[in-house]
């Protein structure tokens, strides 16, 4: 594979091109590169950027991108797809969230610095070689190790910056999460220059899970159909719910955590979420919901210390059912979240 310092997207219609960008070098002179794939469709259309592994141990998105390029054919594509399956190759090699030598969070240093640290240089090349050349993008993530998240997009806001809700809804998930982000996040810094990048969370780090890979692939296909890059109607839930802020539930004792719910469950106040049990004393702590809420994440690694978060909840008092999309070509499907809530007598504001 040929290494370049610049990316040329000017390829022929129907062509697929692979390459790698050389960002910088390490102490022994070896290059730091990240590979990419470009597919230019037979028909004109927008340019979509798909990337994964900004954090090196977040694996599901890598497979999602590979499947997109395996299953979509140029003769069916309107526009161009750019895929960068592993952006943070040093962290990926180390099986870590960040490069253990540099120790910088890649998703906090965008748009990067041309003459900065290794992580800042990776951010600089990715931002300038790919992000600036896209019309929009999907940034695939998972929860951190032990933090299993249901599939959902995250709207990051900061200092008055609020990205378009439509791009997040186009993935076709029932639940959309909005919270305040941080300076240097990819979707915030790209959004500031007018390029919408949707952060899409699917599963948990260090695991390849077919359920979450399929959910990620379906979301990408929905997005592409929504923006007419592929033929067919996107599947959008009848009710999409926007929830803001979340509550972390911690275990007050150490031991083994046994979850009794899963991400995506609607639970009632005082419902049992899980049990922490000490393997030494036999002491048990019953983790219960403090209010009617939605499980967005659950602890998937059983060994916990005192103070470890074991569940991530969103209460419905800060939720809103979004109005129907003004689109005639959308295939409306039922919303499990909304239906489960109604069955339990929990109201979500229309």
Image (tube, helix red, strand yellow):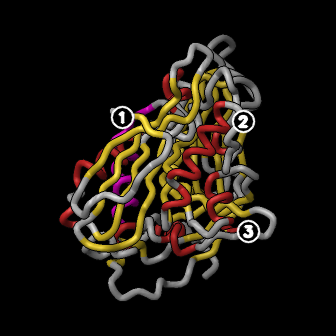
**x and y percentages locating residue 18 in the rendered image:** 32, 43
Query: Would you place residue 7 above or below residue 276 in this image?
Result: below
Question: Quick check: can you spot residue 97?
Answer: yes
Q: Which residue is mark 2?
A: 116
Is 219 inside the magenta-drawn segment?
A: yes
Q: Closest to the observer: 69 or 262?
A: 69
Tag 3 near tag 2, CB within 8 Å: no
Neighbour tally class for label 2: few under 14, some 14-19, many 20 plus, Cα within 10 Å: few
Question: Quick check: can you spot residue 299?
Answer: no
Is 205 inside the magenta-drawn segment?
A: no
Distance CA(mark 3)–CA(mark 1) = 39 Å
Q: Earlier in the sequence, mark 3 or mark 2?
A: 2
Query: Would you place residue 261 above or below residue 192 in this image?
Result: above
Q: Earlier in the sequence, mark 2 or mark 1?
A: 1
Q: Nearer the viewer, mark 3 or mark 1?
A: 1
Q: What is the count of numbered marks? A: 3
In the picture, measured across the screen, residue 235 lies left or right of residue 104, that is left
For image coordinates 31% across by 57% down, the residue present is: 11
**SS majority, magenta:** helix
Query: Would you place residue 33 above or below residue 245 in this image?
Result: above
**x and y percentages locating residue 324 in the rendered image:** 49, 84
For image coordinates 71% across by 45% down, the residue present is: 248
Q: Which residue is mark 3?
A: 161
Task: Give the structural element (helix, strand or loop) at label 1.
Answer: loop
Neighbour tally class for label 1: few under 14, some 14-19, many 20 plus, Cα within 10 Å: few
Task: Give the structural element (helix, strand or loop) at label 3.
Answer: loop
Distance CA(mark 2)–CA(mark 1) = 24 Å
Tell me where the magenta segment starts and ends, as one range: 207-222
Tag 2 near tag 1, CB within 8 Å: no
Task: Give the structural element (helix, strand or loop) at label 2.
Answer: loop
What is the residue that sits farthest to the right in this orientation? 159
């Amino acid at each position: 594979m040929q290494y370049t310092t610049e990316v040329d997207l000017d390829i022929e219609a129907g062509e697929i091109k692979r390459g790698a960008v050389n960002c910088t070098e390490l102490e022994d002179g070896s290059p730091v590169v990240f590979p990419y794939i470009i597919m230019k469709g037979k028909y004109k259309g927008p340019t979509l950027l798909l990337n994964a592994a900004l954090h090196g141990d977040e694996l599901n998105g890598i497979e999602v991108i590979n499947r997109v390029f395996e299953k979509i054919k140029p003769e069916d594509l309107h526009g161009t797809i750019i895929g960068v399956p592993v952006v943070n190759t040093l962290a990926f090699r180390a099986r870590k969230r960040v490069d253990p030598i540099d120790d910088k969070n890649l998703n906090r240093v965008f748009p990067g610095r041309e003459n900065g640290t290794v992580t800042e240089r990776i951010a600089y090349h990715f931002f300038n070689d790919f992000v600036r050349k896209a019309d929009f993008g999907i940034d695939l993530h998972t929860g951190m190790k032990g933090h299993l998240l249901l599939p959902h997009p995250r709207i990051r806001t900061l200092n008055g910056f609020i990205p378009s809700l439509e791009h997040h809804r186009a993935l076709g998930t029932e639940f959309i999460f909005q919270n305040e982000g941080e300076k240097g996040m990819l979707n915030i810094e790209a959004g500031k220059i007018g390029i919408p990048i949707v952060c899409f969370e699917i599963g948990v780090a260090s695991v390849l899970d077919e359920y979450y890979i399929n959910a990620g692939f379906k979301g990408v296909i929905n997005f592409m159909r929504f923006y007419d890059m592929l033929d067919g109607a996107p599947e959008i839930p009848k009710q999409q719910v926007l929830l803001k802020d979340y509550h972390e539930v911690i275990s007050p004792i150490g031991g083994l955590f046994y979850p009794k719910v899963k991400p995506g469950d609607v639970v009632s106040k005082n419902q049992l979420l899980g049990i922490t049990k000490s393997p030494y004393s036999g002491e048990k702590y019953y983790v219960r919901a403090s209010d009617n809420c939605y499980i967005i994440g659950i602890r998937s690694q059983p060994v916990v210390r005192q103070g470890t978060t074991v569940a991530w909840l969103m209460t419905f008092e800060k939720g809103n059912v979004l109005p129907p999309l003004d689109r005639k070509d959308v295939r409306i499907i039922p919303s499990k979240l909304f239906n489960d809530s109604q069955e339990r007598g929990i109201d979500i504001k229309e």
